[in-house]
Amino acid sequence: MTISGGATLTGMCSMPMVKLTPPILTVSRRFKPLSVASAEQPLMTVENFEVDLTVKRGRLETEVERFSLKDYLEQSRELLMTSDGGPPRWFSPLECGSRLDNSPLLLSLPGVDGTGLSLLLHHQRLGEIFDVWCLHIPTTDRTPFTDLVKLIERTVRSENDQHPGRPIYLVGESFGGCLALAVAARIPHIDLVLVLANPATSFGKSPLQPLIPILKIAPDHIRSGLPYIMSLMTGVPSSMLTSTAKKGLPSQQTITDLSEAVASLFSYLSDVGDVLTVEIVLWKLKMLESACAYSNSCLHAVSAQTLILSSGNDQLLPSLQEGERLQKTLPKCQIRTFSDSGHALFLEETFDLVTVIKGAGYYRRAKHTDYASDFIPPSSHEIKDILDSSIWIDLATSPVMLSTLENGKIVKGLDGIPSEGPVLFVGCHNMLGFEVAPMIRRFIIDKNIIIRGVAHPMLFRKLKENGMPNLATYDVTRLMGAVPVSPSNLYKLFSLKSHVLLYPGGVREALHRKGEEYKLFWPEQSEFVRMAARFGATIIPFGAVGEDDYAQLVLDYDDQMKIPFMKDYVKQTTDESIKLRNDMNGEVANQDLHMPVILPKVPGRYYYLFGKPIKTEGRMEELRSRERANQVYVEVKREVEKCLNYCKAKRENDPYRNILSRLMYQATYGLESEVPTFDLD
C-alpha cells in the first residue's frame, strides 16, 4: 500500500576527571551530595522530583512551577561561594528525574562560569523527557580545555557502551558550545545531538578582546566592577526586568517583584565580585581563547546532528553571523534565531528549550527520529502560547464549523466528532494548506483534541538554499505532532489512537492550478481504507471552503513552466525533495514543488463541514477485499465533494462572509462574541 498525501505545506554516573576521592561538595538543596567517587562509581545519584504528569486527551499537563532567574542567581551564588575547589564533576539535579522509558541522556556543558546551572530554568521540563547530567567546574579549578574535552569524551563513550542504541545530547551555551563541538569531533562514530546556544567559536571577534590587556593593568577598584559590566553585556538585567513586567500582575505586585529581582541581582553580583579575582577572570578568558581555537580547528570533523540557537541582541559575541557560518560549515546543522534575545539565552524566562527542541524535530530516543512514537504532546503552556500567537487566525477567518451526527443531521460545532480515536479526517487541500491552521486551532479550543497531520516530507528535511520556506516555518506543525507521510507512520498513529489528518490529493491539490479550487486529485485506488479498518478507525470526510475569498492565484505551475529561470528553480527544488507517487500516472503523480504567486484579497470567511462518520470497526475482514475497500474509498471521496458543494452553496447566504461586516458586528457585541452565519436547513 502507498500513502502519499500531505497534511500541510505551511531526557549519575561514572566519570570523575581523575581517580581520587574528592571532598564532599556542598551544593544547593536541589542537588544530591556527592558520594565517594572513582572512575567506575557515580558521582551523584538521581532522586525523583515529585512532578504530577497527566495525559488527558493527547495533552501533557505538567503541574510544576518553573524556576525563575531569581532562583538561578540564588543557587549559582551558593555554588560559587561554597565550592570546595575539587576537580570537575557531574551532578544530576533532583528535579530532573526521567519521566519516559528509554529517555536519552542529556549532558549540560557549562558556560565559562562553570557552575553547571545554565539550564536551571529548564530542569523540570527537560527532566520529563531526558536523563539530565550537568558538569560542574569549581571556580578555582585549572583544568585545561583539552582535559575537559577528554573528561566529557570518556563519559560519552562509557554511556554509549551501556546504551548503544540511545542518542546522547550535548547542550552548551557559549563556552559549553565549544566543548560540545570539540567532543563531537573526537568521536564522530557515536550518535550525538548537539544543541549550541551562542557558541563561543566567534570569541576572536568578541568586543571583549580589547579589554583583556587592559584588565591586566587595571586598578583594583575598577576590577571589582567587572561582574556588573559583564552582567549588563549578557543582557541578564534587562531580561529579568522585562520578564517581570510581562507577567501582567497588578502594579503593586509588579513593583514588589521588580524590587526583589533587582536586590537578588545586585547581591549576586556583589558576591561574585568577591569570589572572582582578576587571576580567575584572566584564566577564564584564556580558557575561552583556547576553546575558540580548538573547536574551530576541528569543525571539519564534526558530523553530529546540530541545532544552533542564535541571539540577535548578543552584546558579547557576533552570534547571528556565527550561527550562519556554522550552518554552512556543519553538514547536519539547522539554526533557530531569537532576534530580541541576549547572550544568556537559557536564562531568559520567555525561552523554552524543550519547545525549541521538539519544534525543530530534534527529539528522538533512538538512532533515527520516529515522528510518530517520539511525539511528546504539547504542554498546557505550549498550547496557550500557540493559541495566543495565532489569535489573528480566528479574527481573519472566523471559521464556521459544522459537523454531521450519526443520524445524518448537520449541526453547528463539532458535536459529530468522536472524542476517542483512532479517527481519520480525509479532505481536499486548499491552496498552500490555508485551511489547516484554523481547523486545528478550533479542535484544540472546542474539543481539546490535537489533530496529527500526515504531511509532505519537505516539512522535515532540510533542502538546499532556495525559495521554499525555511524548515523553521514548520516548527509549530512538528510541535503539534505532524509526521512525514508513509504507511508505517499512518500505522503508528492509528495504533496510538490518534486523530489523524490526511489529504489523498497531497501536493497536487495544495499547489493546484488556476480554476482548480476545490477539485480533488485523488489516486484511483484506495490508500487508507484497509489500514483504517485494521484499527477500527472512524473515517470522517470533510470539506473546507474559503481560499478563493483570501487570495487570487496569479502565477501557477503552468505559468512558471513557461518562464525559463522559474522552470529551472522548480526542477531543482523537486529534485532535492523526496519523491512521492513515482509509481503512478496522471495528474496525481505530478508532485513538482513550486511556490505559486498569489495576490491577497480582502479576507472572507472559512467554512468547514465534517460529513457523516464512516465506521470501520468490526469490518476488517469485510474490507480485506480490494473491491469492497474501494467502494468505501469512493464513498469517502463522494462525501468530501458533497461537503465542499454544501459549503460553497451555503456561504452565499452568509451576511457576515466579509471581514468588514464581521468587524462591525464584533465592534457592537464585543471581540469575543461569536459571529453568526447562515441558517442550517
Image (cartoon, rainbow, N blue to C red):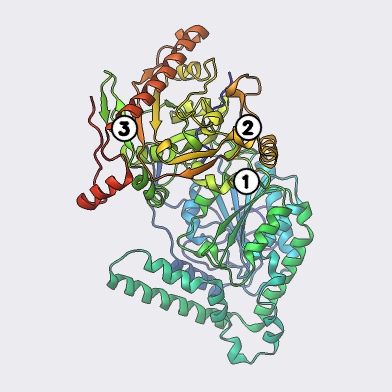
569 vs 484, nearest the viewer: 569
Name the residue that disc number 1 marks: 467
Question: If the image is split into quadrants, where does the C terminus sit?
Answer: top left
Looking at the picture, how far across and down is residue 299, in whole percent?
A: 76, 56
> In the image, is 583 to the left or to the right of 60?
right
Query: In front: 529, or 179?
Result: 529
Q: Amino acid at mark 3?
A: Arg
Going from N to C along the chain, the mark reached first, 2 or 3, is 2
Q: Is residue 285 above or below residue 198?
A: below
Relative to 384, residue 370 above or below: above
Residue 255 seen from this side: yes
Q: Nearer the viewer, mark 2 or mark 3?
A: 3
Disc 1 residue type (three-letter): Gly
* Eye-nearest disc, 1 or 3: 3
- For the residues labelled 2 and 3, the Cα–Cα distance comes to 32 Å
Name the residue: 32% across, 27% down: 649
Q: In which quadrant of the rendered view does residue 361 lie? A: top right
Look at the numbered disc 2 and give the secondary structure of its residue: loop
Distance in Å between CA atoms under marks 1 and 2: 14 Å
